[in-house]
Image (spheres, rainbow, N blue to C red):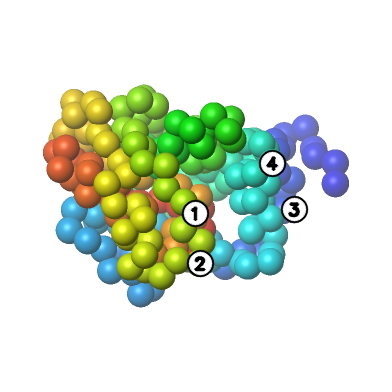
Amino acid sequence: MKLSDHEHAVCTSCLNEKFEEAWSRKSFSSSGVLLPEGITIQHALWNFDKGGHLQELLHQLKYNRLTGVGVDLGRQLGKSLLRNSLFTERIKSEKVTLIPVPLHAKKRRMRGYNQAFHIAKGVSEVTGLHIIKQDAVLRNKNTSTQTGFSIEKRRKNIEGAFDVVSISAIEDAVCVIVDDVFTTGATTFELAANLKKAGSKEIIIATVAQA
């Protein structure tokens, strides 16, 4: 399908597919998600549609270098965040930063980019929030894929994977973790625990999809 002049990497008809919203305007998290201490909001835009259009978009972003898809999905995520009054109340703080879930350096070199960063770019465009410097929070453990793992195995796999290098960037900040898909929360919860130790004031998780 040909894109119109005002469109970007994803056509309007694709973005207007009847994806099922995962977030609720009256809830701090999606149904069934229990948030650890320090995380105040878990916001996922759409429910993951295995074998559907959303899965295909996320696959193209992650594996086929279509980074513009990530920016477009990030814009949609940003718009939904601004419709969430629980979120907008919390970003009135003077220090708010977007933190794309980091990739290990080896994986980033192989892939050529971090898909979460491009989603964060779209969120930043819409919300005006800045993205943390790439080397401020690192992934120091090259973990294997979490697909097919039990909840406990996911936790073990990701344990100790992140390191906060720039404490000053995190201290007293409202940190908004950005990623593509929220599944069990093992990855984002582990990152959040590190941010909390570094002195984060509050942590919010924002993802395009929830599986």
Q: Which residue is mark 3?
A: 13
Q: Residue furthest bottom?
A: 32
Q: Amino acid at mark 4?
A: Asn
SS of the residue at dot 3? helix
Q: Amino acid at mark 1?
A: Thr
Residue 26 point in image, percent of width and height: 33, 67
- First in sequence, mark 1 or 4: give its number: 4
- Quick check: 104 above or below 60? above
Report if the CB atoms under discs 4 and 3 are less than 8 Å apart.
Answer: no
Report if the CB atoms under discs 2 and 1 are less than 8 Å apart.
Answer: yes
Q: Which residue is mark 2?
A: 148
- First in sequence, mark 3 or 2: give its number: 3
Left or right: residue 10 versus residue 29 is right
Residue 185 point in image, percent of width and height: 36, 60
Q: Which residue is mark 4?
A: 64
Q: Amino acid at mark 2?
A: Gly
Could you tell me how far apart the alpha carbons at marks 1 and 4 are, in whole angstroms?
17 Å
